[in-house]
Amino acid sequence: MIIQALAFYVFAFVAVAAGVMVIASRNPVHSVLFLILAFFNSAALFVLLGAEFLAMILVVVYVGAVAVLFLFVVMMLDINFAALRQGFLQYLPIGALIGIVLLAELVFVFASWTFSPDVAAVIAAPTPAAAQVSNTHALGRLIYTHYVYLFQAAGLILLVAMVGAIVLTLRHREGVRRQSIARQVARRREDSIEVVKVPSGSGI
Amino acid sequence: MTLPAMLPALPEIFLAVFGMALMMLGVFSPEKRAFKTVCTFSIAALLATLVLVLANPGGRGVAFNGLFIVDGFALYMKVLVLIGSVVTLLMSERFLRHEGMDRFEYPVLIVFATLGMMMMLSANDLIALYLGLELQSLSLYVVAAFQRDSLRSTEAGLKYFVLGALSSGLLLYGCSMIYGYAGTTEFASIARVVSAGALPAGLVIGLVFLITGLAFKVSAVPFHMWTPDVYEGAPTPVTAFFSVAPKIAAIGLFLRVMVGPFDGMIAEWRQVIVFISVLSMVLGAFAAINQTNIKRLMAYSSIGHVGYALMGLAAGGRSGVTAVLVYMTIYLFMNIGTFACILSMRRQGSMVEGIDDFAGLGKTNPKMAMAMLIFMFSLAGIPPLGGFFGKLYVFMAAIQAGLVTLAIIGVVASVVGAFYYLRIVKLMYFDDAAEPFDTPIGKGVGAVLAVTAVITLLFFVGLSPVVEVADAAAASLLQN
């Protein structure tokens, strides 16, 4: 038990510290690397919770795809971060004020956390006991049966996002030579090769 | 799940499948004809969906484990949204071809946006609400930036996207708080938790965030900043679309969320709604006075109209919901008509958008001036035109609910607002004629103009059946 608690505090501390470093470090590449560290620690926290599927997804999707994409973007775009930070001090007081007010409100709300008495009766999709099914199985059952409508709707949203990206950026440029496999295959010997009898000594 | 169990969602399923088929059609038809073909088929698909919606036997239907609900209210609002989408598509065809942006993705995106709106109106769960809203918004961001070579259009799209994403974030935060404190995302179960009494503070704060997100989507003050810029920058048919269908859908969603699951908290949310309603009406009336661009003016006008619609919501109850439904019905027709006029403002082949360009229209094009006169009087709320009855019902509902001050502010704001509508009428009939607009304005736009003008003018003839249907729809919303 104590090992588990110890592991939790280590992972949680590193995750929070990495999160701070993401916004504090000067070099944007370091920021992305700290972000990856934060993802790994969050995945470890999921494992501690017994949610191994979410942990793996976090590593595969966020570290494997999203963070690498971030890294590409940061390295490819020439962003002057010093210029971006100008005016930071100027807006700091008002930003800090709003942040503190919001934080105070949240503390106030969460300090009085009480579930409403009916909660047990209204739970939409109760999870089966962990001993019966693995959580991958349980999630799959929910997503593909109970929430199939939402799953399909999310798919449509992604489709629209893809269409939008293509519509707004794809331009058909003139004069680009494209590969046409049909034309390549249909090409015959007579079209491209000409046998020329060259009398010796006169050239072509 | 068997097929009959999905039957309540038939129009949506049909539209989703057809939307994807349209995309294939666009890709595989010859490039020259793709836009025209897809446009025609999109209009046909939307009309077929309208028929499917109308063919619903009525009564309450639930599908997908209670995530999706169909009732009289959803049907009523869906009909309005579909009419809005079909008419905008009819009007945009010529404009898009003229401006060289006739790519077939436009009608496809409009179809998907409409699908998103229908999903919003049928949402019976916080997650379903969010997904419908996002499907709609994402399509709208893209069509706002559709004129990608124009700086103003891309700016409009980007601005809309950034602020829309922010508002979605607020909305999601509110949803997660509500989920945290109520323990469920289903509307019916939330209603049970709310009516059980002893509200936790977190639920109220979650609701406030949810209202903020929704107020962004309907562009109510103080979350309206994006509206004038987006309306001005987006291509005109897109602006026409923005000002009707998404607004009606968002108001419908607002009603469903407030009157449905959170009905028991009316004491908590009424003050918020009253506040944003007053601000919207006042800002809509005063900020529009200085405008010189007609699309910007219509943006402020729509902010004001949202204020009146929210007054009906603040009144709550059956009469309040009925009033909003009647208001949105007439709003749809007069707004589409006004935009049909704006779309025909074209001189020597290029669009003009200044208010001064209306000068002398009464002499150069009496028919169009007459139509514009009807729309302006109606927007200002002058009897016996349609807009008057919309306002009348809203004010009556507010007074019935004891919100007399709110109603008085509404009347004063509508008097102030009448100034800028009447200014356009004065320009058209009493100022020296400017160069006439290009004629002919095109069959689609012309037909829309004539039909909406007649509907706005003769709305009082069909008033009682409309009110009757709206009342039944309101009753169906309240019994959930």
Image: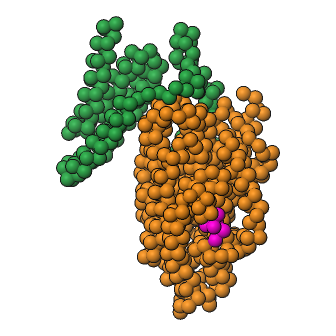
Chain colours: A green, B orange
Question: Would you say residue A112 is visible in this rendering?
Answer: yes
Where does residue A119 sit, x and y in percent of width and height? 53, 26
Q: Residue at x 78, y 33 (%)?
A: B4
Where does residue B197 sit, x and y in percent of width and height? 53, 34
Q: Residue at x 38, y 35 (%)?
A: A109
Q: Would residue B56 be found to the left or right of residue A1 on screen?
A: right
Q: Nearer the viewer, residue B275 or A191?
A: B275
| Quadrant of res A52 | top left
Compared with B96, A24 (above or below) is: above
Where does residue B255 sit, x and y in percent of width and height? 59, 50
Q: Nearer the viewer, residue B127 or B241?
A: B127
Compared with A13, B289 (above or below) is: below
What span is colored magenta in the figure? B388-394
Instruction: State yes or no: residue B393 in magenta.
Output: yes
| Quadrant of res B263 | top right
Q: Which residue is situated farthest in the bottom direction here?
A: B432
Q: Which residue is situated farthest in the front direction here?
A: B402
Q: Residue at x 27, y 18 (%)?
A: A10
Q: Nearer the viewer, residue B203 or B377?
A: B203
Instruction: State yes or no: residue A22 in magenta.
Output: no
Compared with A7, B4 (above or below) is: below
Q: Quadrant of the N terminus of chain A?
A: top left
Q: Would residue B15 be found to the left or right of residue B213 on screen?
A: right
Q: Residue at x 38, y 22 (%)?
A: A43
Where does residue B386 sit, x and y in percent of width and height? 67, 70
Question: Would you say residue A168 is visible in this rendering?
Answer: no
Instruction: Give the main secondary structure, helix, strand or loop, of the magenta stretch.
Output: helix
Compared with B470, A56 (above or below) is: above
Q: Would residue B347 be found to the left or right of residue B393 on screen?
A: left
